Image: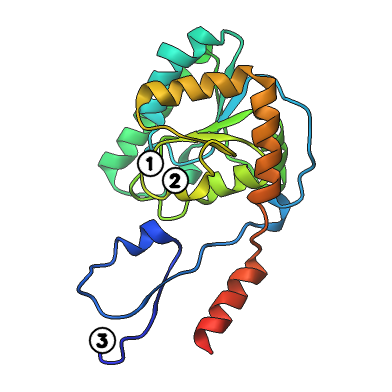
Amino acid sequence: WRRGLPVAFVGDYHTTTYPQWAPGQRIAIPLGIDEPFRHASERSSPPPRAIFTSNPLRGLDWLLDVWSNVIRPAVPNAELHLFTGSTTYRDSRAAPAERAGAVLEKAKNMAGSGVVLRDPVAHDKLVGELEASRVMLYRGDPGETFCLALAEAQAVGVPAVVMPIGSMAERIVDGVTGFVARDDKAFADNAIRLLTDDGLWQSQHRAALARQRSRSWDMVAADFERLMS
């Protein structure tokens, strides 16, 4: 407090969680992308498969409803693969754990709507699953101060549809590597476009590869070294 030391955050949204009256200069140092995600090749349009790789309590219940009510009826052969479960949810409290279990049970019962509940996988295998996916669908959550899951998908060249919640808008180049949807209808409409329009998908896929995988952990370390010097 006396020295007014700089305080490091992982992004612009994250800096807003620090009280304005608190001391210290706010410095944003975004996280890096793990190496397995930074070397994907350009590829042809995959089948209409969407992917979700986050905590089941971070908007999955909402996504399942939008998927079954709007997206899947418009793209009857589409699938939504969920790489989520107990290993992506680490809250030991009974009530949140019960809610997470209810969401996962709901997902299990939606196979008829193209929902495929998968177990989380290691990074080397997740890269392949992302490469086989056409779009990442993630509403977002106020607790997402950076969202590595979304950053990893973008680095592999997977377009994404998100909403302006938490740090989501910082991970997407809106209209270029995905879409930041302002409401539920826009979310579903853009998801349908990416699942069906090969030209749009190719454009956003190439843009994501070109613009969203350059930040390595060495660059993060260099930023901290400059800050400390």
Q: Which residue is mark 1?
A: 164
Occupied quadrant, residue 104? top left
Q: Position of residue 94 (x, y in %)?
A: 28, 43
Residue depicted at x 64% and y 19%: 197
Q: Which residue is labeled 3 in the image?
A: 1
Picture coordinates of residue 52 (x, y %)?
53, 34
Q: In the picture shown, does residue 137 fall above or below 224?
A: above
Residue 220 falls left or right of residue 96: right
Q: Give the CA distance from mark 2 to mark 3.
A: 32 Å
Image coordinates for residue 35, horizontal then vertical, percent: 71, 57
Q: Are marks 2 and 1 in contact (CB under 8 Å)?
A: yes
Q: Residue furthest left?
A: 21
Question: Mark 3 or mark 1: which is in front?
Answer: 1
* Label 1 SS: loop
User: At label 1, which amino acid type do we have?
Assistant: Pro
Amino acid type, mark 2: Ala
Q: For residue 126, say whether it is visible.
A: no
Circle 2 is placed at which residue position?
A: 169
Residue drawn at x 61%, y 47% is 152
Mark 1: give few (<14), some (14-19) or many (20+) Cα within 10 Å.
some
What type is the residue that disc 3 sits on? Trp
* Above or below: residue 77 compared with residue 229: above
